[in-house]
Image: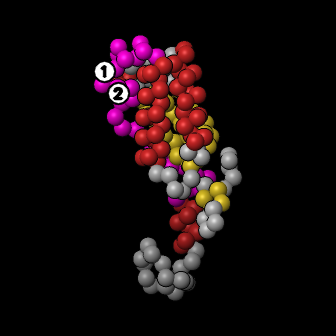
Amino acid sequence: MGSAQRKGSHTVTRLTCHIVWSTKYRYKVLEGDIKIRCRDLLIQICESESVAILKGVVSSDHVHMYVEYPPKLAISILVKNLKGRSSQKLQQEFPTLKKRYWGNHFWATGYGAWSSGNITDEMVSNYLEHHRKENDDDNSNFILE
């Protein structure tokens, strides 16, 4: 997928996002085999959701993912799936994690998400402003061409 656009029957998109979330209490438990398995699980989940991982980092207490995703998939649902499914599997496969995390909660509540793209807000604004007629007295942000 990379920098290519997704083409649907009536759509063309390239939606990218930087997502970050952390372990509960910021415990540094993503080490060794747990870290490797976490990365493998996140890759599998993304593949099942048709999400391309453009870049990612599994740190000792948090995860960064820069992804390209389909328009039918809300970021909130993607993060829910990434955190929920990886948490369940990691706790099943590494029983030592259950000693640290009671109640089956491995990841902290919440996440950060920032959209990204290859054009700036200023570029879009300038392009749209170009459609304003020369003698247009209407100063609205919503231009009538």
Q: Nearer the viewer, residue 73 or 88?
A: 88
* Whether residue 57 is visible: no
Residue at (61% x, 68% y) in the render: 10
Badge 1: few (under 14), some or many (20 or more) residues near its Cα, within 10 Å?
A: few
Residue 29: x, y in percent? 44, 17
Q: Is residue 13 left or right of residue 102?
A: right
Viewer-side residue, 104 vs 58: 104
Identify the residue at the far bottom of this view.
135
Q: Residue furthest left?
A: 103
Vertically, is 96 above or below 51?
Answer: above
Looking at the picture, which amino acid does disc 1 mark? Trp
The correct choice, above or below, for 64 with respect to 122 in the image is: above
Magenta-colored span: 94-121
| Residue 55 placement (x, y as % from top left) | 61, 36
Q: In the visual, does 129 lie left or right of 101?
A: right
Q: Which residue is mark 1?
A: 102
Residue at 64 percent of width and 56 percent of height? 6
Residue that mark 2 sits on: 105
Q: Residue at x 54, y 33 (%)?
A: 42
Name the amino acid, label 2.
Answer: His
Q: Where's residue 49, x and y in %?
A: 56, 45
The image position of residue 88, as x and y in percent, is 43, 28
C-alpha separation, residue under disc 2 versus residue under disc 1: 7 Å
Q: Is residue 95 magenta?
A: yes
Look at 36% across and 38% down and name the residue there: 110
Instruction: Residue 9: name its quadrant.
Output: bottom right
- Here the colouring is secondary structure
Could you tell me if residue 49 is visible in this image? Answer: yes
